[in-house]
Amino acid sequence: MKKRLALMTVLIFGLSVALMSCVTTQVKPTEKNFIAPKVSLERFEIPQYDGYWYYAKSVKPTKGDAGNRGAMLPMSFLFNVENKNPYPILLDGITFTVKFDKDFAVVTYTCNDQYWIPAGKSDHIRATTLITARSALLSLLVTGGFKLKEKGWSPWDALERWWKGVPEGTTPVHIAECSFSFSADGVSKTYPYEMQAQ
Amino acid sequence: MKKSIFLKLFVLLLGVALAAGFSTVAAAKDIIRIGGIMDTTGGTSDVGKDYAIGMSDAFKYINDNGGVNGKKIKYTWFDYGYRIPEAITKYKMLKRMGSVIIMGWGTGDTEALSPTVNKDKIPYVSASYSAHLTDPKKTPYNLFFSSDYSTNARSAITAWFDKKWKNHPDFGKRKPRFACCYMFASPYCSAPIKAIKDQARLLGFEIGEDQDVSLFALDTKSQIMALKSFKPDVLWHGNTTMSVAATIRDAYALGLGADWIVDNWGFDENLPRLAGEAAEGVMGATPCAFFGQNVKNMDIVVSSAETYSPGVPLGKRLNRTVQAWGDALITWEALKRADRKGVDVTRKDAGEAIMKQGFETLRNFDIGLGAAPISFTPTDHRPATGCRIQIWKGGKFHVVEDVDLKKRWPELWKTKWLGW
């Protein structure tokens, strides 16, 4: 009786291993059969809004240290990643630059967290960035200074308009220089994407 | 008998389970953690973003090409927005994560972190090429692949003297006049000023008053007007590309008439795009080639940019990518050498051994990319003994001169110029 039980256990274990290997090796990922996942922006949101303000370091704060500080503007991007492949894929890299008014880069986001996306399924991936009126000012001055000058905009006017317009949905927000990296069983692929957040 | 069957069965299943478990553990153990502190949103993001992307490309390429003798690198980087307090916070986090080497960025934060890095014995490979970081007696864990800023500055003024001043109608009749434009408060901008003035005196220049030009300057007319009365023959600009472009545009518009020599972070493919015809004839320090220039290993840099960062058009990539590769390639070589000598490069306390068995064994190491051969010794962390100076002329960059300071002034190089 116990011998039969032992044999049954071995049989079940062996079958499980065999079936598992069948599932994972049914279609082996290759450079040729890897289908580019479809990535789209499901939703763009401002998770917390604190208005527009800026204090120069000459202003004494009620508490803490003085400094050049501006209002934070967190931005949250919910991506939909659709894996059309007949095998699971690992998303292990996201990079993109957020641009306001199409031309003005305010932050570059990168993430190497790992997310498995099952075969034929979609997954939601959230990326959250955080900028301040101070960080955006510095970035704007060194990367967009000449463009501002051409448009006749002052950096302060641009910042105020963006800090008010982004949460209200009136400032165009663009995801540029974007790429998502995937891998599956030794095959690695990076694809470019472009998206309009609002 | 029955007990024995069960026992054998149990041992067999346990063996399978343990083998599966340990294979994961083994894989995780073979990971080399490297951290990065980059500026993609701050005051030097005009050059920092391309560098950050290039560094990420380089480590992906390294992993796809054997890693460190089979061991994979896990490269984790953060944007610190060119803010020193944030760089310190990020450094502590990367240390907690077990980084064996950290790829850093600016001069202010690299110099501020240097005492901590020395105490922690973590090799810190920065994009700051400040000469203050080259004397191992003071900064034994700071490294970079490029000629340092002081070597760049000395080389640039020497090349101008050799190639421009010697053909000037006033050559031999009077002293050439020289002044510096840079942001006084920026540690990066001010790092080589003492050295370039020393070199100017050595070559017999008359030195005018410095002009304070912010890294964020879009209007520099007042500084140009102040320079006009001095009638400079040549000016050094020590900022990054955007403010260099603004200054040379204003100088051109106001008819200043002086030549420009520029430090490496102000001299890239964007300079002629931003400065237009004012960029004609501007010379600069180029410790490595421009993106796509026909030099050894550039094909790898370009194809990696296409493969790993397809979202960024190749036409927008800069020599900053190439500079990032320079630092990544010396790191790769140091890790491979240390690993071959039996150092466990995955251990978070391996920094000292990686420095001694890796970085400090490099002698005239050729990374290609138009860079000078690289050496580090336990007594001298100046990677290169001179710098290539190029000029923007007729829509292209051209080599002006490869200045080798050590060959030309061997005694001064050996006894006087280390560490500043």
Image (tube, coloured by chain):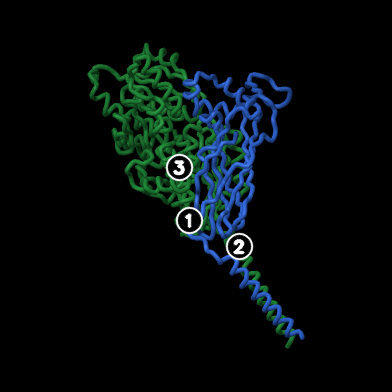
Seen in the picture, residue B224 relative to B163 is either above or below; the reply is: above
Q: Give the Cα separation between the discs numbered 2 and 1.
A: 18 Å
Query: Which residue is depicted at the point 37% across and 11% down?
Result: B229
Q: Give the Cα separation between the discs numbered 3 and 2.
A: 32 Å
Chain A colour as displayed: blue
Residue found at the far bottom of this picture: B1
- Say which label, 3 or 1, has the lower sequence index: 1
Q: Which residue is mark 2?
A: B24
Q: Chain of mark 3?
A: B
Mark 3: amino acid:
Ala
Q: Chain of mark 1?
A: B
Pick whichever, B130 or B94, lies toward us. Answer: B94
| Camera sees residue A77 | yes
Q: Are marks 2 and 1 in contact (CB under 8 Å)?
A: no
Q: Which residue is mark 1?
A: B67
Location of residue B227 (image quadrant): top left
Q: Position of residue B277 (x, y in %)?
A: 34, 23
Q: Which residue is mark 3?
A: B324
| Camera sees residue B100 | no
| Labels in figure, total | 3
Pick whichever, B70 or A73, lies toward us. Answer: A73
